[in-house]
Image (spheres, rainbow, N blue to C red):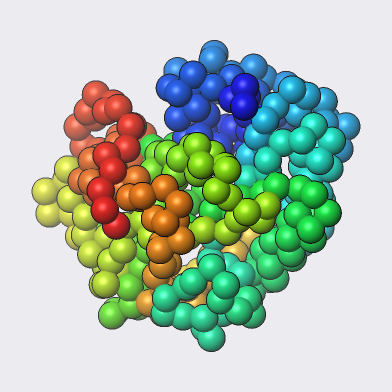
Amino acid sequence: MTRHILIIGATGGAGAALASACIRRGWRVTGLTRRDVDDRPTASAIRWVQGDAMQAADVLKAAQGVDVIFHGANPPGYRNWAKTAPHMLQNSIAAARAVGARLILPGNIYNFGPDAFPVLHEGAPQNPVSRKGAVRRQMEQMLDDACRAGLRAIVLRAGDFFGPHAPASWLSNGMVRPGKAPRVVRDPGTAGAGHAWAYLPDFAETVLRLLQVQDRLRDMEVVHMAGHWFDEGRDFARAVAKAGGVPGAKVKPLPWWIISALSPVVPLCRELREMRYLWQNSIALDNTCLRDLIGVEPHTPLDDALRDTMNGLGCRAVQDQPRSTASTPAAT
């Protein structure tokens, strides 16, 4: 490998974390973007190509000479998800085939229903109960079909993302208000329900470690990250409150009744409401297959991960100097 990656969605949470990790490793990074790049330190180290993931020609142009394509694109504002998301993935599949690159899709647990809970294994039945879950199942089936015809792909599934640059996450959209130290942290979960979280720099490190063992990967490789697991989901909200550095910060339930009332007119509320079942059940991801491939899963200590996250969101009472986001491996 010449270690050249195209990141589609390099300004998003997972894409930006992966770009930073790749640059630290000496990879060449190309980013496909529809808008002006931001001022993050890594932005100047990325070769930016203006284009749209909805346009097959734009994706193919950006993919020239790359070894890996990371497909981190999401429809803006959840608009027209059922048509847009599969179409963008199909363009990435076509580009990966054309240039001989391995395609990586960041996965989640939307495509599983309660019949697969409480511990998700890679081969668990996919019987989604939401619109986005059905789309996710369709997208993974598209990859599987393409791999039977010669594509090489990785689906790395994880719990809810959090990190210093994760603008579209449950933490930043529902639990705290970005730019403001929290006096109240909202907990979306039902009492007694466990929950899995994935720190974005750990996710990025896991991607790179999988790419280091490509000779051991199947054409269609699906693996799970365990991430940070909480037997009692509210413990994560308590840790967020502590990381905000506000004495007396409280944890209160997310007001689902307000979200339900606003869902007919507010798209974000509609999307949040649809995924409520994921907070009413304990759902853990088994990472046995991942550990068989790479050894220990990258696992940044929670206090460090949350401090970086709250700093990045502007949610700490006193801002710290940014820490290195290099992961500290631990057996998980």
Foreground residue, 206 or 214? 214
Residue 123: which quarter of the image?
bottom right
| Quarter of the figure with residue 270 | bottom right
Residue 320: image location, x then y, percent: 22, 28
* Left or right: where 136 falls relative to 188: right
Furthest-left residue in this view: 247
Q: Residue furthest front?
A: 215
Residue 228 image offset from top left, x and y in percent? 32, 57
Of 120 and 13, which appears nearest the observer? 120
Farthest residue, direction right: 57
At 33% across and 77% down in the image, what residue appears?
A: 193
Residue 18 in view of the camera: yes
Task: Decide if residue 141 is on the left or right side of residue 113.
Answer: right
Indicate the position of residue 317 as horizontal and vertical percent values: 21, 37
Q: Residue furthest bottom?
A: 115
Q: Position of residue 43 (x, y in %)?
A: 53, 19
Q: Is residue 299 above or below residue 254?
A: above
| 84 w.r.t. 273: above or below | above
Q: For the C terminus, give its image quadrant.
A: bottom left
What is the number of callouts on the image? 0
Residue in the picture at 62% in, 27% down: 1
